[in-house]
Image (tube, rainbow, N blue to C red):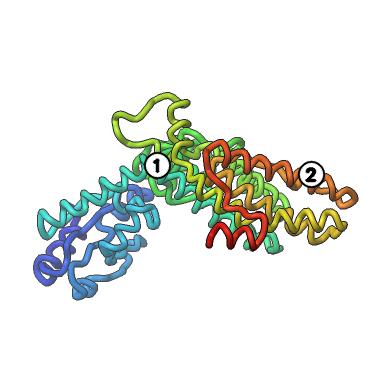
Amino acid sequence: MHPLTKWVIDKIEKDYKDDVALLIGIKGHSTDGDEHGEIFDYFVPATERADELTETFIIDGVGHDLYPRSWERLENSVNLNDMPIVLDNATILYSRSEEDTNRFEECRKRLRENLHNDTFVYGKALECMDKALEIYRSMIFEEKLYRVRSESDCIHEWLSRAVAYLNHTYTESAIYSESQAYNEDEKSRMYSCPEMKTVPEDFFTNAKKLLETDDVEVLRKTVFALLKSTRSFILEHKPVSSSASDSPDSPDSADARDTLAISKVDYRGLANWYQELSLTWRRLRYFCQNNMVEKAYTDACYLQEEFLYIAQEYKVQELNLLDSFDRDNLLLLAKTANRFEEIIQGILADHGVKINSYKSVEDFLAKRG
C-alpha cells in the first residue's frame, strides 16, 4: 500500500469512521508513473462532516486532490452524465461496510449494463451531438485561432464520446488517432479509448487535420466534416425497435422485428396529428392558389418539419415537400402537398382509423348532439 493511501485510510479510521462510506482509487489517470488517481482519487461521504477530509496538495510536482463524490453524483456516472471512469476503473481502497461496497458494485454493474444497451447509448450519442452542435454555433463566428482551436477540441471530444458510446464504451477525451482508439495500455485510459473499433468515415483523417492546421477557415470546414460524418454514423446505429422486447420469445428475423415495430404504432395519435395539421394544408392551398409566395413557403417549411416528425414517431415514409417549392410555380407545391395528404389519409384508412371530420357546423352538431 502506498504511504499516502495509508495516511488517508488511517485518518478516516481515526477521525471519520462513521462519516466516510468509501475511499476510491482510479486506474488510467497516471502519467509517467506518477500513480495519480491510484493512490486515491475521491471519497464517498456518508455525512456532511466527511467534507472536512477534502484536501489538495502537491508532492514533488504531482498534484493530489482528495475530494468528495456523492452517491447522487455516482448515479450521474451510471447514466453517462458524468465521468464513467470513476466507476469502471475504480478500486475500493477503504470501505465502511459490506453494504457500502455492494452499493458501489451495483452502480458499476448498472453502468456496464447501460453501456451495452443499444437504445440507451443511442440516446446518449444524440445528446453528445447536440452539445457539439451547440459549441459549433458559436465557433462559426469566432475569428481568433486559439479560440477556434479550443472550441474544435471541445466539439471533437463530444463527437468522440458519441462514437465511443455506440461502440459500447466511453472516452474522457477527444480521440485523434488510431493509436488512441486501439491502444490497450490501461495506464493511458484517460487519453485513449481501447474498445473503439468502429468509427465514422474519415474520422481520424479529419481529426488529424485539427492538429496540423493553423488556418481558422480550415478548422471550421474540418469540424463541419466531422459533425456531418458523425451524425450519419449515429443515425446508422439507431436501434431497429426499442420495443423489440427483451424476452427470450422475441422473434429474431428482421421482418418479424419490423412487424412488431409497426404493430406498436399509435395510428390514433397519427389521426390526431392529421386533424390538427389539416388547417395548415388548407392554408397552404389558399396561399399557393393566390400566389402568396412568402406565406406559402413558411407553411410548407412547417409541414416539412412535421413530416420529419411523423417519419420518426409513426414510422411514416419520409415525405419530401420542399423540393417541390418553386416561387414561379406554387401550384406544383400545392399538388405535392395534396398528394401527401392523400397518403396520410390512406395510411389511416388502411389501419381502420376513422378521421374525425364533418362537412359543416350543422353536421357536427347533428352528429355530436
Instruction: Please name the residue shown 60% across and 59% down the image.
Output: 364
Give the image quarter of residue 44: bottom left
10 Å neighbourhood of mark 2: few (<14), some, or many (≥20)? some
Q: Is residue 164 above or below residue 157?
A: above
Residue located beneath label 2 in the image: 335
Q: Could you tell me the amino acid type at mark 2?
A: Lys
Residue located beneath label 1 in the image: 169
Q: Which mark is residue 41?
A: none
Disc 2 to disc 1, C-alpha distance = 49 Å
Give the image quarter of residue 194: top left
Q: Position of residue 328 (x, y in %)?
A: 90, 50
Which one is in front, 314 or 17?
314
Please tell me which of labels 2 and 1 falls first in the chain. Answer: 1
Q: Could you tell me the amino acid type at mark 1?
A: Thr
Which one is in front, 133 or 144?
133
Instruction: Please name the residue shown 84% across and 58% down the image.
Output: 293
